[in-house]
Image (cartoon, grey):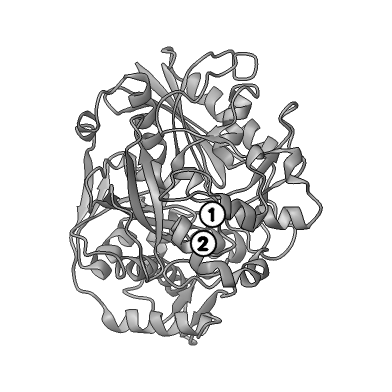
Amino acid sequence: MSVLAIDAGTTGVTALIVTEDGRIAARGYEEFAQHFPRPGWVEHAPEEIWQATLAACQSALAQTKVAPTCVGITNQRETAVLWDRRTLAAPRRAIVWQDRRTAQLCERLKPHESEVSELTGLRLDPYFTATKLTWLAENGTNLADYAIGTVDSYLIARLTAGARHVTDPSNASRTLLYGLASGGWEPAMLDLFGVPRDSLPEILPNYGDFGTTDPGAFLGLELPISGVAGDQQAALFGQTCFTPGDVKCTYGTGSFILVNTGAEIVRSDAGLLTTVAWQTPSGELTYALEGSIFVTGAAVQWLRDGLGVIGSAPESEAVARTVPDSGGVVFVPALTGLGAPHWDPEARGLITGITRGTTRAHLVRATLEAVAYEVRDVVGVMPPISVLKADGGASANDLLMQIQADQLGVPVERPRIQETTALGAAFLAGLGAGIWKSQEELHETWQLDRRFDPGTRDEEAYARWRHAVRLASTQG
C-alpha cells in the first residue's frame, strides 16, 4: 500500500508516492509562476497551481505501477483563494501569504489587536488570510458570491469536481477567523473582518474523510482524500514530533519553527504564534507555538536571481566555505518585512559592514549566517530545547546546519527524508485510510541522516546581527 502526497508549496507542487514503510517510491515536481503586480504584492493564479498539481502527480504516478491507496494534501498556508462554486474558476489571482498590501489595514484595526490575539492566538499582520479577504471586499469583490478558502480547500474542490468545500484545523487556525478555544469559525472575527460564514469551508479533523477524487477531474483516479494539514504542521507531524516539547525547523522559502505544546493552549508575549498542530477524529486537539520567519531560503534565491552572485542555491555552501566568516558583513533579509519575533511588516532588507575587501563569498556567507541568526532569535523566546529537528530544502546545506547548531548551542538533527512536509501529509492520510494504526508506528519510520553538534558560538557576530536588525526595523 502507498499514499499519494500532494505538497502545494509557495513556488511549486511536489507529489510523492510514500510506501507503508515510510520510503519515497516516486517523486514529481512542477513549478508555477510568481506574480508581483506592485512592490510588496505577491499573487498566484489558482488555475496555475491546479495545473502544476496535475503535472506533478502525473509525473510521480508514471514512475510506479502500484496505484496509491489514498491522497494526502499539504499546502502553503494563509494564502487567500476565491472560486466559483459551480465552475470552480477563480475570479482573480490568489493573494499569497508573503503579500504585504494590507499593512495599513492592520494599522487601522490595531484597537482590536488584543481581542484578535486572545481569540485566535495570532496577531494583526498582513501575513494572515482574513486581512487579505477584507482588502478584497474593500476593493470591489463581493465575498458572498464565491467559495473562500486556503489552498487546501481549493485543491480539494478541484480534486472532487466541486463536491466538497472543506478544510482542517491547522489551516483554519492560520486565517484569523478560527477560535482556538471554540475550535470553529469565530463569529466576532467574521464580523471584524467582514467575512461571510456561508462562503467558508467546513472544518474537519486532520485525518478521516475529506471526500473522494473525481476520475474525470483527476487523472482517472477515484481515491479517498484522507489527510490534510498546513505545510508547517504537516512537517511537525512528518518529523514525528508527537511529544510536547519536540521542536522542528523547516528551512524553505521562509523558516518556521514549531514546538509541540500538547493539549495545552500556550500563549507567548514574545512574538510567537499559538496554532493548532492537528486534530484527531475523536476531536482531541494538539497545539503548537510557532515562530514564522518570512525570508530565509528566499534570500539565497535573491542572491541567485536578483544579484546573480551565485548560479544555484546549492552553490551557496561551496562559495561560503571559501571564507572563514562573513568579514563583518551582516545581511538582514527583511525583503518582505520582519516576522517573528519582531513583527515589523514595514521593515526592509539591509546589508551592513561592507568594505573594499568584501567579496561575493562574504555576502553569501552572511546570508547563511542570517538564516541561523533569525532562527536563534525565535528559539531564544521559546521554552528551552534540547535538540532541533531540521528539514526543508536548505537543511541539505551542511555549513548552514553547523552554523545553526553553533548559534543555538544544541544539536541539530537532519532526517534521511527531508521532504517532511509531504511526508506528514502522507502520514496523516495513511492514518485516515488505515495504512498505519498509530503515531507510535509512524515514529519507527523516522531515520537520522546526520547530527550536527554545537561548537563555538560567535557572540560578537550575533551582537552585530542584533544591531543591524534594529537599523532595518521601523520600530527601532
Q: Position of residue 143 (x, y in %)?
A: 73, 45
Residue 176, numbered circle? 1
| Residue that carries the numbered disc 2 in the rendered image | 116
Q: Which of marks 2 and 1 is in front?
A: 2
261 left or right of 43 in image: left
Q: Where is residue 402 in the image (x, y as percent from the top left)?
A: 26, 62
Of pointers 2 and 1, the one earlier in the residue sequence: 2
Quarter of the rendering containing residue 259: bottom left
Question: What is the three-letter code of the residue carrying label 1?
Answer: Leu
Q: What element carries label 1?
A: loop
Quarter of the rendering containing residue 404: bottom left
**Quadrant location of the N terminus in the rendered image:** top left
Q: Residues within 10 Å of mark 1 (few under 14, many from 20)?
A: many
249 left or right of 52 in image: left
Q: Residue at x 18, y 68 (%)?
A: 455
Question: What is the three-letter code of the residue carrying label 2?
Answer: Val
Q: Residue at x 21, y 28 (%)?
A: 441
Q: Where is residue 379 in the image (x, y as percent from the top left)?
A: 31, 65
The Cα atoms of the two marked residues, 2 and 1, are separated by 7 Å
239 left or right of 305 in image: left
